[in-house]
Amino acid sequence: MKKRKAFVIGLATAIVAVGAIYVGQALHYSSAQVFFKDTEIAGVNVGGSTASQAATKLKSALKNQQLTLKDGSETVSTFKTQQVNLKVTSQTALKQLIAKQNIWSWPVHVTTATADSIELNASNENQQSVQALAKEISTKANKTRTAPTDATFTYHDGEYVTTKAHTGNQLDAAKVAKSITLAIEKGNTTVDVSQDYLKPDVTTKSAAFKAAEKKAENITKQTYTYKLSGHKITIPAATLASWLTFKNGKLTTKTDLVKEYLTKLSSKYGTINKTRTFKSTKRGTVKVKAGLYGWSIKVKSETPTLSKLVLAGKGMDRTPTIQGSGYHNSGTDIGNSYVEVDKQNQHMWVYKNGKVVVSTDIVTGLPTTAHHTPTGVWVIWSKQRNTTLRGKNDNGSNYASKVKYWMPIDDTGVGIHDSPWQPEYGGTWYKKHGSHGCVNTPPSKIKSVYENVSVGTPVIVF
């Protein structure tokens, strides 16, 4: 019995001793504020070190540490940790890490270090520096790498054909920054970026992509028609489809292609800048080059309008926005109300609804380069009463001619007006006594001309 009692007492004494050691060691870690044995931070052993001592070790170890970015067997780049201005040597951060240690679990750390590594994202300064470096490396590397491609669909033989997205091998700077951070935290000298590729924004599985494809299919089944100067033009389904694209998560149009289509349409059917075949009063059919008269599609404003109508997916039947003069729904151009100026015969006719309402001899410009009356299909773009026409004579002096009726027809100052200073009209008088380019009209006829034309009336000069 005495032996058993002695054993119990001895065991109790041993337990108390061990407990004392356990408590004592725990209190040591608490008071000394050091890292547990064999603790590693960023690959550097800081076991038994205070925050200050650990900071010194880390600063020394990381100062010239070189890291290599690898994509498989390819070396993408190398850099030293000092290039990213790391803040892992912050004593404040190290003290916080020590404080997080569970002092009562110190026996676990006798053979194994389990303290957490300092996370670089705890410092904005670290992240900004790492991200800047990652961006620099990625930008340089991506110049020779393949970019990712989004999923697309194209219209072919009456249906849409889908092309899957492809990743490529360009680097995603944000992912590279995370890989660099992780490598430094673990003390690795190799940064694996083989999984850090940019991903396509759109895949065939994207809900938005599927919805856009369905909408595009519906659009090409609708009828989009322009009524244009007596013509009816239906936009082909393939043309509509070529305008559609998936961008920023939604279906939209390629405005450059829409604009190109409208420009070609305007060129084909518009009359601006086109030579006309004109049936004259005395000289039969003549060709007259373009002047100001004519119309075209106002492409700038019609482009967004057409794009919006296409994306609405409800079809269209409209006349595009027109600019210029002489547009007729019937497809006619000059029409049957116009002014005809025949320079060869020195005569002018005013036609109204197909009938001659004024017929008069005139005096056109001197047949010289400086003062000839310009040939072309022009337009009366203004009407004024009792105004003064000003200009320069050949000798450089200024002139001012008062007229009762003034109807400008081009963009150089040429127009139709009364000319009481002319003693005669018609014949060959203009060859030596012609105007500075205007159509001089007898005072007895000008009032009738003025009253029978309106702004927009074509004036054919040939």
Image (spheres, grey):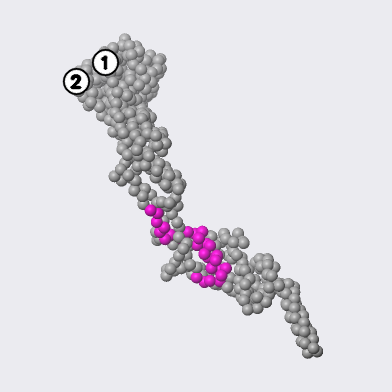
* Magenta residue check for 345: no
**Vertical arrangement, residue 19 with respect to residue 431, above or below:** below
> Which of 376/105 is in front?
105
- Mark 1 and mark 2: Cα distance apart in space: 18 Å
Q: Residue at x 46, y 68 (%)?
A: 70
Q: Residue furthest left?
A: 284
**Vertical arrangement, residue 50 with respect to residue 432, above or below:** below
Q: Position of residue 410 (x, y in %)?
A: 34, 25
Q: Is residue 166 visible?
A: yes
Q: Residue at x 56, y 71 (%)?
A: 187
- Label located before the other in sequence (1 or 2): 2
Q: Residue furthest top?
A: 444
> Quadrant of residue 186 in the image?
bottom right
Q: Residue at x 30, y 18 (%)?
A: 337
Question: What's under tag 2, amino acid-wise?
Answer: Arg
Q: Which residues are magenta?
A: 164-190
Q: Which mark is residue 283?
A: 2
Q: Position of residue 121 (x, y in %)?
A: 59, 61
Provide the residue designation for mark 1.
354
